[in-house]
Image (spheres, rainbow, N blue to C red):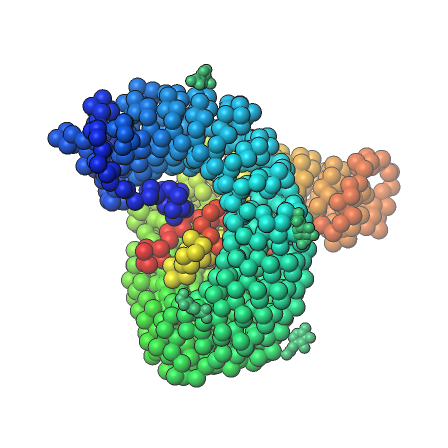
């Protein structure tokens, strides 16, 4: 059965009219009926392949043309999808697009007996990864062959090249099909009549493009996502009849845009998501027939040439996500047919040219993420058909005339967040906004809630975060009927109260970082993301919270909540992914969490006064990644049972009353993904369990691509922002970071987000005895190691020198003896080193990082000598020379902290929710990969998709 896949839906959207057969013209009076042997071949084909009850068919439920093919009906020329030659009666055309065909096709399939076929369309059926039968070569009269998305696989048979009459060939979207064996030169010699060629999604080779450039009849060439590599041959652009060229989504295809000849016939040019670089040539203006130009997500630089004004036929233009700079040319005013203009994510500067308001056909205008300054031109209200206006993340300043902008009655989306407006003129209260569904005014110096938003609005998505909205939430606001509101972000304001909710459809609410006092407001029952951390809420957590049957992220951290966590909260474990109650005054036991089914990935209840033992029910939460019970009063032994939680990466039990030995591991594969273990400030009293060091395999493997932050993200979109001409919709990511406190370099530091490659072991302040196991040296990716304040004896193992990423090593306050291994000077990232208060002796190593540590790293060891201590080594032992000091040692160490800061700047803000806009559905776009690099897309449950579907 064909699964309804994402790809399939995309494919469905991507079908161009080309793929739909032109409406069937009934044959006029014909002397001959259809031939009996062809009739039986068709019936046999129907018999073997027609399955109207398969799921995909039921789902589409519209193409059942083969039902008209019956034994009783003698003249097959009248059957749906069939056309015959009027003179001879032979079947010449078979259009079986989306006809519920399922099964393995082979050379004996009766279809290939229809040797007079000129047109064959089997697109959008399901042939179970069959090879294209070699008997296809018998259909020598074929001029059109369409096998689009019909699950063919294997090699393309060389017999295909016998079809020398082909003018249209579409083999696209058959993921199993390969184009590796065909002799391209032969192909170019034989298929000389080819006009339309679509090989999207096939794996083809780069030299192929050189050959294609010889197919001089081509009028359309579509090679989306073909894994094309190397440099594009300029000759492709010079094909004398080419009107449509689509090389989208070949991220390793590079090249410059060529000089375009005058009156080039190209009408549609898509080079998006390739690696095209260099400038836009002035000769772009020679493409006078161009009506669609998409070179988004590539690598272009330089200015937008003013010759662009010559492209007067353009209806769609996208330069999104390149490196274009300079001003937007005023010649743009001549593009009067333009309905969609996207220049976002470049480095464009200057003001928004007033000429843009001449483009009255515009429905979609995106200039976001540039460096534009000045005001929004008032004449923007000329663009009366505009539905989407994106100007966020620029440096626009002066007065924001919302009263003017909102005269655009068709607007559904208006995003103005992250600009520098100093004053806002709101529309008056009588303005109706019948279509506006998304409004972003984050970081725009607002000091009060905008009144107009409550005026009969149909708003679904409202972002007012990072403003200076202060004081109690006015009651009128809470009473306004925003029936459709499902996303509200008021975080990082100065709001002091938020008494109740009146918005029945609210699904995401972010109130973090305000001054909200009073009891915890009970959100609507269907809420999915509810964030109120960093406020001043007090009182108990009401059991009403247990009725949030769709809750996904619940963050009540850093308030003054008290009392017992309602035990019924564990009822939420089927939907809940993230639970943070950190930093309150909660006491009593953590709920038993007895549900068999548990979705939870993150629990943070640190910094409370919880008692009792760790709830064993957590063993059911097989996806648990992050568990923080730090700073409570839990009395328990080491939870070796958590070794069965295969995804566990962070385990923080700091400062509780854990005690006893850390038992031996039972099953081999435990704690494989653990990266942060903090058992400090407890009463563990065994030897350091060296077996565990052999297990923590995530701490051994260097994965440089693994630069994710700990967090949970959900990918979603608003359907209301569909813009049909682009067949895309706005997606956005809702990202929630896991904050953490880490004792680093002796200081407790609070981080709003942490990169996943930070590997930490903190066993300090317990009663561990015995020696430091040698095996700790196998955890080569460890960044912080703290075993201070225990009762450890024996030497410092020189295997510690293998921990080449180590930035902080604290062994202080033990009973360690012997020398400081000179090999530790290999640790070139070591920024903090403390071995004070031990029984160490001998000379202190004197190279690399060791030249930077001071007295307090060594104090309380009577046998140590040499700098920085004043005690000279009486009988100097030759300190072995450290290896040549690496260039890295020159740099300030502590790499991950630095990098972290840099990324915070890059993202712009941290904590609470981060909203990332991502355009389009295809998954290869660079901006999306950029996001993915930082935020792993977890199992998004696509709640809104369900809601708005
Ligand atoms: C068809 O193609 C095969 C293999 O390429 C070739 O051997 C054969 O001669 C061709 N037949 C015709 C009729 O062109
Ligand atoms: C294309 O345009 C450029 C600049 O507009 C012009 O100089 C050039 O002659 C044109 N090329 C051809 C082949 O016509
Ligand atoms: C807006 O769209 C309508 C319908 O397509 C069209 O008739 C009208 O001319 C457009 N408005 C402007 C200002 O172009
Ligand atoms: C807007 O910013 C630009 C560049 O910083 C500045 O020159 C201009 O005076 C500002 N305009 C207003 C109205 O603040
Ligand atoms: C340290 O360990 C020794 C045995 O190795 C033991 O005798 C001593 O009591 C321990 N000290 C503490 C403070 O636990």
| Residue at x-position 62% and y-position 55% | 285
Q: Nearer the viewer, residue 501 or 304?
A: 304
Q: Quadrant of residue 125?
A: top left
Q: Nearer the viewer, residue 484 or 764?
A: 484
Q: Quadrant of residue 748?
A: bottom right
Q: Nearer the viewer, residue 190 or 399?
A: 190
Residue 674 lies, with reference to residue 512, above or below; the image says above
Residue 574 seen in render:
yes
| Residue at x-position 55% and y-position 35% | 216
Q: Is residue 464 left or right of residue 805?
A: left
| Residue at x-position 68% and y-position 62% | 326
Which residue is farthest left?
72
Residue 601 lies, with reference to residue 490, above or below; the image says above
Q: Is residue 768 left or right of residue 820?
A: left
| Image location (x, y in percent) of residue 387 | 44, 66
Residue 687 seen in render:
no
Q: How many marks?
A: 0
| Residue at x-position 34% and y-position 20% | 107
Q: Is residue 492 left or right of residue 372?
A: left
> Split into 4 quadrants, where in the image is the C terminus?
bottom left
| Image location (x, y in percent) of residue 374 | 62, 74
| Image location (x, y in percent) of residue 493 | 51, 74
Q: Is residue 355 left or right of residue 200?
A: right
| Image location (x, y in percent) of residue 477 | 38, 79
Residue 782 lies, with reference to residue 431, above or below; the image says above
> Split into 4 quadrants, where in the image is the N terminus?
top left
Q: Nearer the viewer, residue 927 or 486?
A: 927
């Amino acid at each position: 059965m064909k699964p309804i896949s994402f790809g399939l839906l995309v494919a469905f959207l991507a079908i161009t009219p080309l793929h739909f057969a032109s409406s069937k013209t009934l044959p006029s009076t014909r002397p001959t009926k259809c031939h009996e042997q062809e009739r039986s071949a068709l019936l046999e084909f129907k018999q073997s392949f027609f399955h109207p009850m398969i799921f995909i068919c039921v789902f589409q439920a519209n193409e059942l043309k083969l039902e008209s093919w019956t034994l009783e009906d003698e003249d097959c020329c009248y059957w749906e999808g069939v056309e015959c030659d009027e003179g001879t009666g032979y079947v010449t055309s078979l259009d079986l697009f989306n006809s519920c065909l399922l099964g393995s096709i082979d050379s004996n399939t009766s279809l290939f007996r229809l040797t007079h076929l000129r047109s064959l369309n089997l697109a959008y059926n399901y042939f179970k990864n069959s090879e294209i039968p070699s008997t296809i070569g018998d259909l020598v009269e074929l001029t059109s062959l369409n096998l689009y998305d019909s699950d063919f696989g294997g090699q393309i048979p060389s017999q295909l090249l016998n079809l020398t009459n082909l003018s249209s060939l579409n083999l696209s979207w058959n993921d199993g099909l390969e184009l590796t064996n065909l002799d391209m030169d032969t192909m170019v010699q034989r298929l000389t009549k080819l006009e339309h060629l679509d090989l999207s999604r096939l794996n083809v080779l780069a030299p192929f493009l050189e050959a294609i450039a010889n197919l001089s009849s081509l009028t359309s060439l579509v090679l989306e996502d073909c894994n094309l590599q190397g440099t594009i041959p300029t000759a492709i652009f010079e094909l004398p009849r080419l009107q449509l060229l689509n090389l989208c989504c070949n991220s390793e295809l590079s090249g410059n845009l060529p000089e375009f000849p005058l009156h080039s016939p190209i009408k549609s040019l898509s080079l998006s998501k390739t690696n095209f670089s260099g400038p836009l040539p002035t000769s772009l203006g020679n493409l006078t027939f161009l009506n669609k130009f998409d070179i988004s997500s590539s690598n272009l630089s330089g200015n937008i040439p003013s010759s662009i004004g010559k492209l007067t036929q353009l209806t769609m233009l996208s330069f999104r996500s390149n490196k274009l700079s300079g001003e937007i040319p005023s010649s743009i005013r001549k593009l009067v047919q333009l309905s969609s203009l996207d220049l976002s994510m470049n480095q464009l500067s200057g003001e928004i040219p007033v000429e843009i308001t001449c483009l009255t056909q515009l429905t979609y205008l995106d200039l976001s993420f540039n460096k534009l300054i000045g005001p929004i031109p008032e004449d923007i209200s000329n663009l009366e058909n505009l539905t989407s206006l994106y100007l966020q993340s620029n440096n626009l300043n002066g007065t924001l005339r919302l009263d003017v902008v909102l005269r655009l009655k068709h607007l559904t989306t208006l995003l103005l967040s992250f600009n520098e407006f100093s004053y806002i003129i709101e529309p008056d209260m009588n303005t109706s906004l019948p279509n506006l569904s998304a409004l972003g005014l984050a970081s725009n110096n607002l000091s009060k809630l905008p009144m107009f938003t409550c005026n009969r609005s149909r708003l679904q998505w409202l972002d007012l975060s990072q403003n200076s909205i202060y004081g109690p939430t006015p009651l009128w606001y809470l009473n306004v009927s925003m029936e459709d509101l499902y996303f509200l972000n008021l975080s990082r304001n100065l709001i002091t109260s938020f008494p109740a909710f009146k918005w029945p459809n609210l699904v995401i609410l972010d109130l973090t970082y305000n001054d909200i006092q009073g009891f915890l407001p009970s959100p609507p029952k269907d809420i999915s993301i509810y964030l109120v951390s960093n406020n001043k809420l007090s009182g108990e957590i009401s059991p009403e919270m247990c009725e949030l049957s769709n809750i996904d992220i619940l963050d009540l951290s850093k308030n003054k909540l008290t009392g017992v966590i309602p035990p019924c909260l564990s009822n939420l474990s089927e939907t809940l992914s993230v639970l943070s109650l950190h930093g309150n005054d909660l006491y009593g036991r953590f709920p038993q969490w007895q549900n068999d089914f548990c979705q939870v990935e993150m629990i943070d209840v640190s910094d409370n006064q919880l008692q009792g033992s760790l709830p064993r029910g957590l063993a059911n939460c097989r996806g648990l990644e992050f568990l923080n019970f730090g700073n409570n009063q839990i009395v328990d032994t080491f939870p070796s049972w958590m070794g069965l939680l295969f995804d566990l990466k962070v385990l923080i039990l700091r400062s509780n009353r854990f005690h006893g030995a850390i038992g031996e591991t039972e099953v081999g594969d435990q704690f494989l993904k653990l990266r942060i273990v903090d058992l400090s400030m407890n009463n563990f009293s065994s030897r350091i369990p060296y077996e565990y060091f052999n297990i923590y395999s995530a701490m051994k493997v260097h994965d440089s691509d693994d630069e994710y932050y700990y967090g949970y993200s959900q990918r979603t979109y608003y359907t209301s922002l569909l813009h049909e001409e682009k067949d895309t919709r706005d997606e956005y990511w809702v990202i929630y970071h896991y904050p953490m406190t880490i004792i680093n370099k002796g200081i407790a530091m609070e981080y709003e987000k942490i990169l996943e490659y930070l590997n930490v072991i903190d066993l300090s302040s317990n009663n561990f005895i015995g020696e430091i196991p040698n095996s700790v040296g196998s955890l080569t990716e460890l960044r912080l190691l703290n075993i201070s304040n225990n009762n450890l004896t024996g030497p410092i193992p020189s295997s510690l020198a293998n921990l080449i990423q180590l930035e902080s090593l604290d062994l202080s306050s033990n009973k360690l003896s012997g020398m400081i291994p000179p090999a530790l000077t290999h640790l070139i990232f070591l920024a903090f080193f403390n071995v004070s208060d031990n029984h160490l002796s001998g000379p202190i190593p004197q190279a690399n990082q060791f030249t930077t540590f001071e007295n307090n790293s060594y104090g309380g060891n009577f046998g140590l000598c040499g700098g920085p201590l004043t005690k000279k080594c009486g009988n100097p032992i030759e300190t072995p020379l450290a290896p040549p000091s690496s260039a890295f040692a020159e740099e300030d160490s502590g790499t991950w902290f630095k990098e972290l800061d840099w990324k915070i700047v890059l993202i712009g803000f941290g904590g609470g929710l981060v909203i990332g806009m991502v355009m389009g559905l295809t998954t290869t776009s660079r901006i999306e990969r950029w996001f993915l690099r930082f935020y792993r897309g977890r199992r998004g449950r696509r709640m809104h998709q369900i809601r708005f579907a």
